[in-house]
Image (spheres, rainbow, N blue to C red):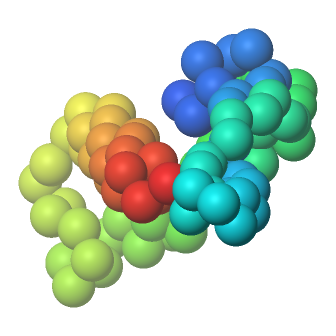
Amino acid sequence: MRWHVCPECGGEGRIEYERAVVDWDNGGYLEGYLDDCFRCDGSGEVQIDFSFLSWARDCWGDAKYLNPNANLKSWFKAERQRVLDEWRSEVGLISSFQ
């Protein structure tokens, strides 16, 4: 596993959340407050697990999973980048709903 800067808090470990405050006269409002980041639990770093790559390496000779004529090193590099991009887009989707 490798450590990466948390994309949610940018490595600070704290992010701003909003909570609803009841105001019977004016209808209420949203109040901002700082708390530990939900993704990294306040550490500022997250771990990404690339253990599935060992499974892919074990399946290297099976044409069903991989092209046996491909370069192993370049494939692992491309697969790692694909996983990182997928993870970043997932984080983007999560933060867009908050």
| Residue lying at 50% horizontally and 54% vertically, measured from the top left | 98
Which image quadrant for residue 41? top right
Query: Left or right of 95: which side holds 6?
Result: right
| Residue lying at 15% horizontally and 64% vertically, measured from the top left | 67
- Find residue 49 and report its horizontal and vertical position in percent: 66, 50
- Find residue 92 and report its horizontal and vertical position in percent: 37, 46
Residue 31 vertical position relative to residue 4 in the rendered view, above or below = below
Residue situated in front as seen by the camera: 68 or 77: 77
Query: Left or right of 40: which side holds 57?
Result: left
Residue 56 vertical position relative to residue 85 in the rendered view, above or below = below
Residue situated in front as seen by the camera: 87 or 63: 87
Query: Left or right of 62: which side holds 32?
Result: right
| Residue lying at 70% horizontally and 66% vertically, measured from the top left | 24
In the picture, the quarter occupied by the N terminus is: top right
Residue situated in front as seen by the camera: 46 or 21: 21
| Residue lying at 76% horizontally and 48% vertically, measured from the top left | 38
- Find residue 5 and report its horizontal and vertical position in percent: 64, 21
Total count of labels: 0
Which image quadrant for residue 51? bottom right
Residue situated in front as seen by the camera: 50 or 9: 9
Residue 57 visible here:
no
